[in-house]
Image: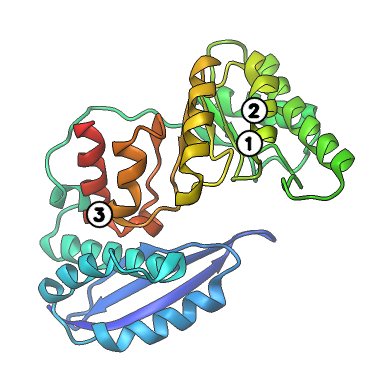
Amino acid sequence: MRIAAIEPLILNVSEKTNWFFIRVTAENGLCGIGEASLNGWETAQLAVAENLRPQWLGKSVDELLPLLRVYAHSSGGLIASSIISATEQAVTDLRARAAGVPVHALLGKAVRKAVRVYANINRGARDRSPEGIARAARNAVEQGYTAVKIAPFDGVYWGDADANELARRTKAGVERVLAIREAVGSDVGIMVDCHWRFDEAGARQVMRDLAPARLYWLECPVSENPDAFALLKRIHAETRALGMQLAGAERQIGLGGFAPFVDDGLLDVVMPDIKYAGGYAEMLRIAARCAER
């Protein structure tokens, strides 16, 4: 089964959001789909896809999958990795469709019977007041979710020269989270995604301010670049002292990118994203490394 076409597909789903997919079609007409969404970088992704496509067209599925799994360890950065990851997903999907089975049947035996899910209420909550955010959280709980996630720190960038404005926006984010806790009660998990917005002092202050909300986890408060690993260790020690888990690493690439976070215990929750990590096979390798620790 040889590859006849590799097509990027961009779907605009809201004024703020595009989804980016790769569709791989075989000579027999079967196709598979993989996701590469990296909002705001679509033009660069299209260029990378156009550059890589000639190297992959005409290859069989059995030839292309091992090649993609080597590419997953390349140093091309997040944009290239998103295209490689999506193509690996799509080719794996194609192989599953050809076999008449779901993708999970190609990935090995189940290791658990259920997976807890959370509602990410962030982009759906257009009313960014504490009351609006609390309402969105209540709606999620009423739909049966036992945990919610929010990225509450709108407009916060730790390098902002206006310290007063930075403090105001940070305080507004904390108030959103505290409003969620008040709205959903004590049994619902709350995750807070910071999107790497803080320096060390800012992160420590935010953690203390959020302590009354009893977070399930705090996600990506500071840089995760290798030169920030010592900082991440210090932040991790404080989150543990405050009774919250530290989560992150969602934009790392390949097992090599995740190894320091796992092996050195930098995080409690490692969050590989199949869109960037290298695809299904690389996700399984990362999961196995986590299970060993």
Q: Position of residue 210 (x, y in %)?
A: 66, 22
Q: Are marks 2 and 3 in contact (CB under 8 Å)?
A: no
Q: Position of residue 91 (x, y in %)?
A: 23, 68
Element on which disc 3 rests: helix
Residue 10 visible in this rendered orientation of the protein: yes
Residue type indicated by callout 1: Glu
State the scheme by which the image is colored.
rainbow
Judging by the rendered image, the residue that carries numbered circle 2 is 204
Determine the CA span between mark 3 and mark 1. Answer: 32 Å
Query: What is the crowding at mark 1: few (fewer than 14 residues within 10 Å), some, or many (at least 20)?
Result: some
Q: Is residue 206 above or below residue 47?
A: above
Residue type indicated by callout 2: Arg
Judging by the rendered image, the residue that carries numbered circle 3 is 282
Q: Position of residue 85 (x, y in %)?
A: 33, 63
Judging by the rendered image, the residue that carries numbered circle 1 is 200
| Residue 70 appears left or right of 34 | left
